Image (cartoon, rainbow, N blue to C red):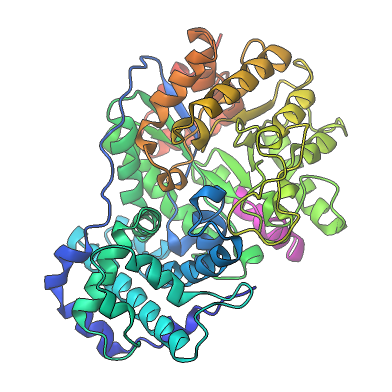
Amino acid sequence: MGVDWVGPVAAVTRRDVLRLVSAGVLANVLSGCRHLPSPGACSLSHPIIDVHCHFFNAADVPVDGLVRYVALREKMPEKRLSSNAAEAKGLENALVVFLVTALGDVAPKAKHELAVLKKGARRLSDAELARRKDEQLRVAVRDLIARAGEQRSTFSRRSVGESPDYDGLLRQLGGAPELPQTFQRRSGGGVSEADVDTVATAAKAHDQIGTYLSFVRLMQDYRENLAEAYIKIFASKCRLSLITPSILDFDKSLHGTSSPQRDQVDVMDEVQQIVTRKHGIRMHSFVGFDPHREAQRPGSSLANVQYAIMEKGFIGVKIYPPMGFKAWGNADPAIDAALKRLYVWCRDHDVPIMAHAENSIGAGCGYGNLASPAYWKKLLDTNQYDELRINLAHFGAFDEVIRPGAPTGVMVSCAQDKFSGPPTWEEIIGRTIDHERRPNLFADLSYLSELVSSDDKNLHAQIRQLLDKWLDDYDPDARHLMFGTDWSMMALEKDYNAYVSRIAEQLTLASVSDEHQQNIFWRNASRFLGLDRPGKTRDRLTAYCDKHGLGSAWLSELAIA
């Protein structure tokens, strides 16, 4: 069910915004959203390649979709805003409107940031950008109070079906001691600045909503700032040799607007160079590909891929089947034809493909199931793509046997959004690898929050046991699993700054040897990316790095005998 969020944003007058801008005294109150965590501990001495991360901001994806399918994509049922499923749905739909309004139009567009990085436009100071974020949060609070008041005045507080329960969400915040009971009983009119401050403070302090607001602030930032935040958190103590962030192409599936793909490629090209020069960490990105866009205008999405790979130092392609397509065998032949153009070009030019392969972020009823590795097996069974290097992302939760029948997330669309029973998707990947018959098929351990953020020791042990068995059965030399953080998405989870060390700890507890851990942390990624040996990928990156004065000797450090 769609939710109207444009109205409240459009209804904010210029006078409102100017008044909020002038209220600089409130910055100290509102800017208190949770800061970035301290750098995580890291005792690993070997190189690390993070094959799966993101530095996009809210201007790069439709904001409603960003909240529904990314921020709220896979929270476990026990993390819902109510134990009552019907009440939870109304609260969560109200939360979507609140968070979308809080995001607003603050995030810098790709074209603007590109001009900033090229010194053709003024960059907002950190303080200025923080004030804009704070002002937009106040807009969202005002809108929530007004909507809750309207529901009370029309005796409709108890939402019908999946209608947003704004009054219920405000009452959730009212559970905090900072929100006076007298305010809860007040109508939406005559709200004071102190009332707005009180609700904003309560929202930031809320165990779950505060986490979402911290994520909102990240998504409102410059992409360069996101890269800097990542490096502070993960590279301060770890030996990160290479990071490969992905950009997305969701416009056709989530029916919104975002920075044009070409602009996103151009700005990430600049960020890549800045990160390398400033920190000595190599960064080469993955470009998005949307077969819907390609099917509507043959050659359009593929042309963007070719531009990014051949001219802008990008290293691979990222696709998202949960946006409404299978890897192979779609009912619409135009989608398969679009995908075939991508697969053939990537195979012939030695370009790796990463695909979302978890039952999550489905853009429609049951769409999460479209990410199943079974459809990749169907593609590879054609025996036309044995040389195509593929990463099926988000391996390791074994949901089909640990959570069979459970909803895939809190923002599910229908009854089909549930985890099936066995076989697990991990097992399908193992069978497809087929004991080294397909050495170019990989999977990554990104956003494995079950091992990093969960305190459930029994769950940890269960996953380790399943992982150990999987390695014994399908990958005894650990040549197919890779490391990835999925930051900034992982910022939605607690203790994400410890991702590297906790994954290493859990692998050790799963009896994965140091030698095999090195495969997982960097060698397999080098193979997947095509950096382990001379070839087209290394030739492209050598030319790019030499052209921009970045040096290319680092490529030999990732060679594997």
**In-front residue for pair 500/262:** 500
Expressed as whole percent of the image width and height from the top left, the position of residue 544 reads: 46, 37
Left or right of 54 in this view: 211:
left
Is 16 rendered above or below residue 503? below
Q: Residue at x 20, y 84 (%)?
A: 19
Left or right of 80 in this view: 11:
left
Look at the magenta stretch and give its main secondary structure. helix
Report whether residue 283 is seen. yes
Report whether residue 104 is seen. no
Expressed as whole percent of the image width and height from the top left, the position of residue 363 reads: 66, 60
Is 153 rendered above or below residue 256? below
Expressed as whole percent of the image width and height from the top left, the position of residue 191 reads: 26, 85
Left or right of 315 in this view: 123:
left
**In-front residue for pair 431/387:** 431
Left or right of 249 in this view: 504:
left
Given the current orientation, which residue lies at the most extreme left position?
Answer: 25
In the rendered view of the protein, which quadrant contains the C terminus?
top right
In the rendered view of the protein, which quadrant contains the N terminus?
bottom right
Examine the structure image and report whether residue 293 is included in the region drawn in magenta. yes
The residue segment tinted magenta is: 289-305
